[in-house]
Image: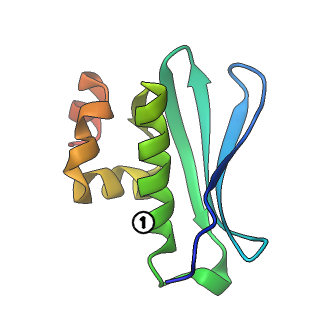
Amino acid sequence: MTAMTGIEAREGEQNAAQRLTLESAGSTVAYVEYYLFGRVVIVTHTEVDPAYEGKGNGSEMARQALAHFRRQQWHVVPVCGFFAEQIRRQPEYLDLVTPHSRCIFDL
């Protein structure tokens, strides 16, 4: 797996799209886009650079994003299918998902 240098939040206006990125050697390996409404984060897209696909970077991106959301004490609505699947695979983060979202996304 590529060595990760951390997760970085790109600050934006409230209710505007924001992005968390996973970096390696100065390059963006993966990112998660989301919208923040109060204390609820709606995750809309996860992407891995094709050069880094198949190496667990998407899963690592999701794990670090979920850890970041937990530290912020935000609730998660995983509209992104990949992100929802990562929560299924990492049930320790299920408590972050809003109760209605658990039903909607079968989590």
Q: Which residue is mark 1?
A: 59
Question: Which of the pair 63/48 is nearer the observer?
Answer: 63
Residue displayed at 59% across by 25% down: 36
- Residue 16 % position (x, y): 73, 27
Rendered view: 20 above or below 48: above
Going by the numbered disc 1, the residue's amino acid type is Ser
Residue displayed at 49% across by 84% down: 1
Question: Which of the pair 57/70 is nearer the observer?
Answer: 70
- Residue 98 % position (x, y): 31, 25
Rendered view: 39 above or below 102: above
46 relative to 14 in the view: left or right: left
Rendered view: 3 above or below 96: below
Q: Picture quarter containing residue 44?
A: top right
**Element under label 1?**
helix
10 relative to 96 in the view: left or right: right
Residue displayed at 36% across by 50% down: 84
Residue displayed at 42% across by 58% down: 82
Rendered view: 26 above or below 47: below
